[in-house]
Amino acid sequence: MKITALVENQSSGELSAKHGLSLYIETPRHKMLFDLGPDKTLFDNAQKRNIDLSTIDTVIISHGHVDHGGALERFLEVNHSAKIYVQRKAFEGHFSQFLFWKVNIGLTAALQNHPQVVLLDGDYTIDEELALFTVENTAKCRSTVNDSLYNEAGRDDFAHEQSLILTEGSAKALIMGCGHTGVVNILEKAAAYNPQICVGGYHLCSPVIKKTVPEQLLGSIAGELAKYDLRYYTCHCTGQKAYKYLAERLPNMHYLSCGETIEL
């Protein structure tokens, strides 16, 4: 399997950086996207890499925030066959609050009725290569950056978030979006699959005020991640300060910038 970052907060080369995430994944059976980013950045970067988005057969949207699924409407204009797997609750209202203002950061609700969209309610196996799962127990090492995020009922519980297990023979990869439910909690559920790598963000830095979670929390997360024999490739919402802290304590911690590729 081959995983390339097409949208990410920083770039290592000719591709354009953008706050958001989209991973292009090739397996023997699939050409797929995990998340779509917020805007046209995905399309511009795909063109630079000669990736034809009309040939994508599968899209996973990790959760209902615009920086991960904002480009869905445009993607559906260029691709008329891919199935889009997303949790049903992802199309509910989602908001970010700063001081007394709440900003809508949700997906376009009308798109949930599109015939290519497959609405899910919890864990779901697509085929032998692709399995999606959600996390209910979110208490361990909870990121305080989540405190500014809301759904229509109040503080967001992130029941709309899903992660992906990629399987190709004995090779297995865990792919997550922002890890709002907590990278530690996600890893605990994913342990049953025995992945060799973990790719995704940990939501440890606020995109609005650029504040990183307390060092005590980072230390707890580092201790939990050290329990697994994994290669970690973090990105997007982890933040550079948190990444550097974790990388100093975890020799198998790496950063995945836009344009970079992982092969397994």
Image: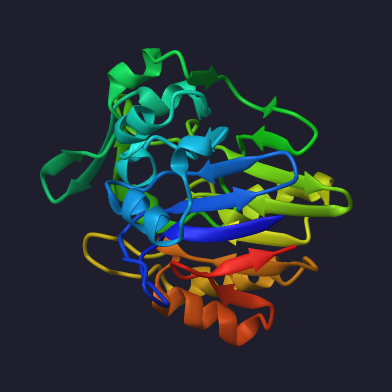
77 w.r.t. 214: above or below: above
Q: Residue furthest right?
A: 170
Residue drawn at (70%, 44%) of the image: 165
Q: Residue furthest left?
A: 100
> 39 or 78, which is in the foreground?
78
Q: Residue furthest bottom?
A: 248
- Quadrant (top left/top right/bottom left/bottom right) for the N terminus: bottom right
> 36 or 64, which is in the foreground?
36
Res 91 → quadrant: top left
Res 214 → quadrant: bottom left
- Residue 161 visible somewhere in the drawing: no
59 w.r.t. 118: above or below: below
> 186 or 124, which is in the foreground?
124
Locate residue 246 relative to residue 263 in the image: left or right: left
- Residue 245 visible somewhere in the drawing: yes
Residue drawn at (50%, 28%) of the image: 86
151 w.r.t. 176: above or below: above
145 w.r.t. 228: above or below: above
Locate residue 64 relative to residue 191 in the image: left or right: left
- Residue 261, position as x, y percentages in the image: 58, 67
- Residue 75, position as x, y percentages in the image: 37, 35
- Residue 208, position as x, y percentages in the image: 22, 60
Residue drawn at (61%, 35%) of the image: 134
- Quadrant (top left/top right/bottom left/bottom right) for the C terminus: bottom right
Locate residue 139 relative to residue 156 in the image: left or right: right
Residue drawn at (29%, 17%) of the image: 110
